[in-house]
Structures are given as C-alpha cells and as structure tokens.
Image (cartoon, rainbow, N blue to C red):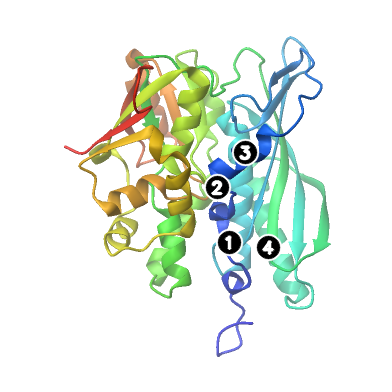
Amino acid sequence: MGNTDGTIRLTQFSHGGGCGCKIAPAVLSEMLSRLPVGVMPPELLVGTQTSDDAAVYKLNDQQALIATTDFFMPIVDDPFDFGRIAAANALSDIYAMGGSPILALALVGMPIDKLPPEIISRVLEGGASVCHEAGIPVAGGHSIDSVEPIYGLAAMGLAHPEKVKSNAGAKPGDVLILGKPLGIGVLGAAQKQGRLDGAGVAEMVAVATQLNCVGAKLGLRDAVHAMTDVTGFGLLGHLLELCRGSGCSAELAFDALPLIEAARNLAQEGVKTGASARNWASYGAETALCEIAPWQQILLTDPQTSGGLLVACAAEAAADVLALFHAEGYAAASKIGHLREQASGARVVVRCD
C-alpha cells in the first residue's frame, strides 16, 4: 500500500495515529475499575491510583526506579520520524515524573508481509537515535508480526525518592505552565486527509521529537509540586487527572495557551481527530467552557503525541520555572492558569477573554 509513485505511506496502514490511538479515558477507567487490588509493597511509591505517567519503586534512600511503557501506530509517513516520535513520547513519561532515563527496550509490531525490512529498520533507527540523544541504550526488546505497524519503548529511569513528581502533589494556588504548543493531533488528522503541506509536517515532527528532558531538572526543584505530560487525552484530560490526584480544581485562560499556528487554522476549518470527540465525551461533564468556540474545544481535547510537560508550581517560583523552560529551548512554554481549592461544580474552568 502506498502512493501512485510506489512510495510507502505508513499512515495508510493504521486506523489511528500516535497517541490518538489511546483508549478513551472513560472506557479505560471502567476497564481498570474491574481489576482486583494486587500486591502493594511499601516500596511502590506510585502505582495506578492517581493515573500517573509511570510506576515508581523505591530501591533505597537515594534511588527510586521509574518504569513505563508506551507504543502506538504511525502518525507520520516517514519511518525514521515515526521511530523518533514514538521514542520521544515514551521517554517523556520518565521526565514527567522528574526522573532521568537509564535504558529502554524496543516494542515492535509490524505487518511483515506489507513492509519491507528496510522500512522497519528505519523505524528502529529513528527510535535508537532519540535514545542516543537522551544518553541511554536500547538494551533489548520484543517484536511480533502484526496487522498494523506499532512501535514504542519500555523505559526505565531513576530519581531521588523525595524528588518524584506525581499527580498527587499539586496545591491550591499553584501556577500551571505548559511546555509545548498544542495541536499535534490536528496536524496528524490533516496529514491523513492530504491537507498538510511539507512545512506543516516538519513543524509537527519538530514539536513531537523535542525531548522533555527539562523534566529531570524540574524534578530537583521543591517548588515544582506536580508534573505530567500532555498526550492522548488532550490538555483537559491530563489536567483533570492532575486535579483529581491532588484534590484541586483548575482555571485556564484559553488565550494564554501556546498553539501551533497551523493547527489553529485547521481547527477553525473543523479539522479534528476522532479521539478529540471521544475525549470530550469522557470528561466534558467535569469542565466548564466559558464562551468557547468549537475550534477551541477541538484544541483543548486534541490528543497530543509527545506533547509538552504540564507543571504545577508555587506561584513565587513560576517566573523561574518558565525561565528554565525557555533557557532549555522550549520557546513556546507559557503560564496557562492556576489551581484552586476543590469546590462543587466543574473541576476545570476554561475562560476566553
């Protein structure tokens, strides 16, 4: 399967792309609610209770092991870029916990009868290149013959047990900072529809392959109370997880959100992913959108693939945290709102001034 010129388009093999493939939040919650309570050793600092990005297990007084896995189907056609995006997305979970990765294992599922070995090799090379950038080895992995192309990593990292940043640490009065612009899902949908030009694809790849390695430095700051990365559930979904874990509510200013300009324009034309609607159906009842246009709701629920870090920090530290983001190369990083005491009504309020 490919173009008329014989080139292979990876996105044509998948029914969804990137983190837009994730199971809808409400469905996932129902599935997990049926799981029996398992072994809960005291060394397990972070498990499934607060919908965090990774599990954290205390090894000793100085080290905690962070473990995560993430994989998905192609969001771009170029195999090398697909590998890069998938690897950056998987490693983001380590950084979102305030840790540093130490090694990764590759997870590979490919339609062997449809993709030549050189294409699959390029996917693996792309993932390995990002791991090299992160300073870690791809130390092994597992592969299967599957109907759709799938690639990702199981990743492990380390952090000090007292410096781990979970969804449960945010406090009322904290400022919310987002590290990358929104709109990757919209760009991916536009690409599948043939509506995204080369410049748009390049911008999507640039945003999605930027490692969230600033998270390791943010993890060392006591004024940073909680972190998560914005991926398949969209900004609203992952903010809601943080609010639930911390027992807070949030208020966002839509006009303060960093947006990919091409995604803004496409969303205004109605371009969106199927996951956006599923996301809203899962958590819309917990939000209040004040005079928000349909295109703005699209971007608030847009599934991000390898999206930015969402940080909750003390108000007095917000300027320093934002300065660190900018110094580390996250030019779009912005203050987007704040947390408050949980009250009755919507858990997240979005205002558009």
State how far apart marks 4 and 1 are (Cα).
Answer: 7 Å
Mark toward the start of the polypeptide (3 vs 2): 2
Please state which amino acid type lies under the numbered disc 1: Asp
Q: Amino acid at mark 4?
A: Val
- Can residue 303 be spotted in the picture? yes
| Of callouts 4 and 2, the N-terminal one | 2
Image spot of residue 282 (x, y percent): 48, 43
Q: Nearer the viewer, mark 2 or mark 1?
A: 2
Q: Specify few, some or many for label 1: CA neighbours under 10 Å numbering under 14, 14-19, or 20 or more.
A: many
Q: Position of residue 255 (x, y in %)?
A: 23, 40
27 above or below 188? above
Q: Nearer the viewer, mark 4 or mark 3?
A: 3
Q: Please identify, in this view, whether the residue under mark 3 or under mark 2 is nearer the observer.
A: 3
Residue tagged by mark 2? 24
The image quarter in which residue 154 lies: top right
Residue annotated with mark 3: 30
Q: Position of residue 328 (x, y in %)?
A: 44, 35
Q: Quadrant of the C terminus?
A: top left
Q: CA distance from mark 4 to mark 2?
A: 27 Å
Alpha-carbon span between mark 4 and mark 3: 33 Å
| Between discs 4 and 3, the one toward the N terminus | 3
For disc 1, the marked residue is 81
| Sooner in the amino-acid sequence: mark 3 or mark 1 | 3
